[in-house]
Amino acid sequence: MSPNLQNIPSVDKLLNLDPINQLIQIYGRSLTIDCIRIQLDIYRKKIIQDQINLLSMDKIIDDIRDVLIKQTSPSFKQVYNLTGTILHTNLGRAILPEKAIQAVVNAMKNPSNLEYEIENGKRGDRDVHLRDIVQKLTSAEDVTVVNNNAAAVFLCLNTLGLKKEVIVSRGELIEIGGSFRLPDIMKRAGSKLVEVGTTNRTHRVDYETAITKQTGLLLKAHTSNYLIEGFTKSVSVEELASIGQKFNIPTMYDLGSGSLVNFKNFGLPSEPTISEILKQGVDIVTFSGDKLLGSTQAGIIVGKKEWIQKIKKNPLKRILRVGKMTIACLESTLRLYLNPDTLSQELPTLKIFTRPKEDIFQTCIKIKNHLDNKLSHCTISIIESNTEIGSGSLPSQTIPTFCIKIESTQKSLTKIENSLRKLPIPIIARMENKSILFDMRMIFADEESIFIENLNFLE
Ligand SMILES: *Cc1c(COP(=O)(O)O)cnc(C)c1O
């Protein structure tokens, strides 16, 4: 016989049970009572709708425990990124170097000289902690840091282009990840966008004829997430800088990702470094802290002292400034670049990018063996594939990798993909051509056993 409302125990009765008292020890009395009430309400509704067949005390206690676990487990948590996109914006971009983590822990636990000059006992400037190291690594005259690169671009525009014209090539009116659209950012920053050239071709003369007394800035944006190919022409950073110098107008390059070392030295696809770009004469370069740099979210503005000082004096800098954990993290990450010999071991992003293919293959074999047992109804193989760097870094170039490929019926794949996301440490995989792909590049040998343990919860 299905249960009726009289079969639901009272809160008081439940509170006298040992297992419930154990839950109170763990979760506290008030939260436990809250969760008991929530669960008893659910039973009431279900009984009225005739949706319950059996209601034992054991089941009630289990259900209450589940509600408590659900209510107390954090929303923000670790996942496995097997998507094959390393700097995945939705999955938190770069993972941090151990030394940077220690610096952040230290900043969290203790007072610091964040804005204090220890030498003369005066109030200081938080950007100072990054100045020497950035100068050393990029030869920039000065640096300032804000919350992210979007904020960096905004602050520069609002400082140099407020109520002025800012000239941009039509081929560089970028949208990054849906929410960063250059024309919209410019409008909000108070700059008047002056588009020059065409989508595929922009020439020096296009900039020169667009310059007026109202021009405040010449802006170049890195076309991070697309390529314009074929019959194309764009004005180089060097050329843009020379136009700026000729007309005495500042120039800026929104570089987006930006790297401090030449990735070619590590056998990877490469782009000019920040130092090489500054050498071409551009006044300001902005880039992200959590893309190729491999640190935390931040927008780094480097360039000529004259402009950086102006940017720092903008009242909006105070609104967009970073916290002490970001300063600690960035400084510590940047210091790793002083020794290029250890960089590919100390900087996780670089370690991931340069991981030998054979090593990834070995991990694939181990995990595949395990999956063969767990998912015996699927066809599982190891295939060659490509890892993407992500976050619009080097959009046309990938790194060869190995993936585990899981094939089955569409219905079964959808179910597996769903279960993977419900694991204690959710696995985010790549769905491709009626298969699930695991790019194992980010799971190193010392993480394999925890990875396998986690897979054991797969239903
Ligand atoms: C990524 C990117 C941005 C935005 O940077 P965030 O750090 O995500 O705010 C802006 N411009 C370019 C060219 C980018 O690649």
Image (cartoon, grey):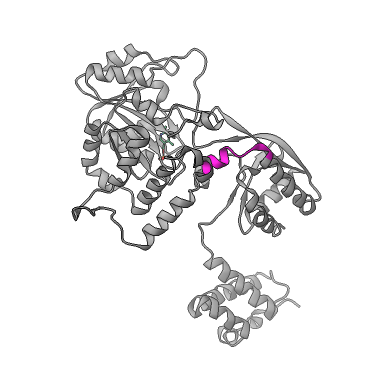
Q: Position of residue 270 (x, y in %)?
A: 50, 28
> What residue is rendered at 45% in x and 17% in y?
200
Residue 141 image offset from top left, x and y in percent: 28, 33
Report the quarter where the C terminus lies.
Answer: bottom right
The quadrant of the picture showing ligand 1 is top left
Residue 298 coordinates in the image, percent (x, y): 38, 44
Q: On the image, which quarter does residue 153 sit in?
A: top left
Position of residue 96 measured from the top left corner of the image (x, y, whole percent): 48, 48
For residue 383, which quarter of the picture?
A: top right
- From the viewer's perspective, tell me whether residue 74 is left or right of residue 279: right
What quarter of the picture does the N terminus occupy? bottom right
Q: Which residues are magenta?
A: 348-358
Give the farthest residue toward the right. 377
Q: Quadrant of residue 308?
A: top left
Q: Identify whether 47 is placed above or below 21.
A: above
- Asked if the stretch drawn in magenta spans residue 351, the answer is yes
Give the left or right position of residue 65, taking residue 146 as reference: right
Left or right side of 289 for 398: right
391 is within the stretch colored magenta: no
> Can residue 414 be seen at all in this image of the molecule?
yes
Name the one closer to the observer, 3 or 446: 446
Q: Nearer the viewer, residue 180 or 8?
A: 180
Is most of the magenta stretch helix, strand or loop? helix
Relative to 61, residue 81 above or below: above
Total residue callouts: 0
| Residue 88 visible in this rendered orientation of the protein | no
At 66% from the left and 37% from the top, the residue drawn is 357
